[in-house]
Amino acid sequence: DSPLSDRIQAMNESATIAMAKKSREFLAKGFDVINLSFGEPDFQTPQYIKDAAKKALDDGYTFYTPVPGIPELRQAICDKFKRDNDLDFLPNQIVVSTGAKQSLANAVLSLVNPGDEVIVFSPYWVSYEEMVKLAEGTAVPLSGTLENDYKVTAAQLEAAITERTKLIMYSSPCNPTGSVFSRAELGAIAEVLARHPQVYALADEIYEYINFVGEHVSLAQFPAVTDRVITVNGFSKGYAMTGWRLGYLAARLDIAAACEKMQSQVTSGTCSITQRAGLAALQGGRASADEMVAAYRRRRDLVLDIVRDIPGFKTPTPSGAFYIFPEVSAYFGRTAPDGSTIDNSMDLAMYLLNDALVAAVSGDAFGAPECIRFSTAAADDKLVEAFRRVKESLAKL
Ligand code: PLP
């Protein structure tokens, strides 16, 4: 008999982390694996941010901080919302956490009761569904279509809402699809929500700065729903600060206070040094992000050029983030040189790891079992080599 709780036994391990683990095993055996499974910028954190962290350490800034973050950082986050998103928040509406991931978990655990339905726009980021399960809610995936770049429409949302619906969750720019909601699309979604006052929205804007179309729109900008939107953002992607663990949410005061209470019993305030670094990051504006975005855009174009020549891959053009998410079902049912059949995207991901030595993540984990996700956050020459190998391996099927 296992001593483990039903809760943890029902939870899936993160598929992206599992694939990264496998690819490290291959590397350790001496294989030249190109790992495109991870959602991680390959850039170093900008120097001015590192300098602020060194200074915090030298200044002896090593004590517990207030649970929802240091006051200067909460103020700087309010200033950022005003500058970038034309949103007005007070510092007590901001909760700083150990990454956007914790902000999302805080919000889900603070809002969802057992049996509540959470509409998760699909394809979705791997952790959304597991967080809802942890809160004993029911995740209801709602899939966008390939023709609409996988974006859920207002009409689809209207049809999916029931009296049990408590929350919707989405990311824009989206991981894994790279899609970005336009003002018109989010406005229509806000109109639907306006008609259903019991429904809240968790807007994950972690890829805000990695946007190739220009306009980033926040759902909270639509006055009819501002009070019911929890906006999540962070530093991992835009400032290349994945390892620092710093994210935040902004919400109505009662919801922010609930998230603070949740965090106070689980982790307390995030790292004091990291918060000082985050403050410097925001004070530096978005110049460093803009440089990185130019590289992400160049890589997206580079990869799309190769991938468009791969038969059977249907790949929408990502408007943001750093992934491509081709539909690959044309390969299902085919036979590999060793006689095994490719039945699904998991088999295809394993075949590509074994044959092309390229690690990607099967779409199952994102609610899209006919797709596969490749990260484009790698050096240009690695990307060219990886997709050359992928193309060659697929030609053997
Ligand atoms: N949300 C999305 C859509 C992500 O892709 C990620 C990271 O991969 C996160 C949240 C978590 O970000 P953080 O590193 O700030 O916890």
Image: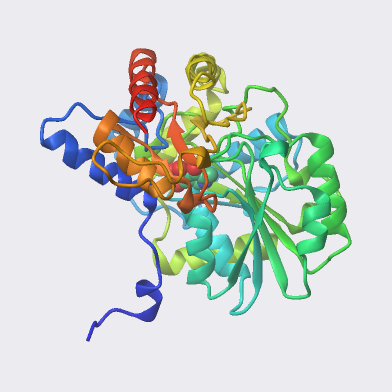
Where, quadrant-wise, is the N terminus in this rendering? bottom left
Relative image position of residue 85 (x, y in whole percent): 72, 34
Q: Nearer the viewer, residue 55 or 311?
A: 311
Q: Check the image and name the residue furthest to the bottom.
A: 1
Where, quadrant-wise, is the C terminus in this rendering? top left
Q: Name the residue at 55% across, 38% down.
A: 327
Q: Name the residue at 51% across, 26% down.
A: 311
Q: Is residue 264 above or below residue 155?
A: below
Q: Check the image and name the residue furthest to the left.
A: 29
* Protein image colouring: rainbow
Relative image position of residue 377 (x, y in whole percent): 42, 26
Relative image position of residue 157 (x, y in whole percent): 77, 56
Q: Nearer the viewer, residue 200 or 250?
A: 200
Q: Is residue 155 left or right of residue 87?
A: right
Q: Is residue 232 above or below residue 238?
A: below
Q: How many marks?
A: 0
Q: Name the residue at 87% across, 52% down.
A: 191
Quadrant of the rendered image containing residue 275: top left
Relative image position of residue 93 (x, y in whole percent): 65, 53
**Residue 297 seen in the current view:** yes
Q: Is residue 168 above or below residue 183?
A: below
Q: Nearer the viewer, residue 195 or 153?
A: 153
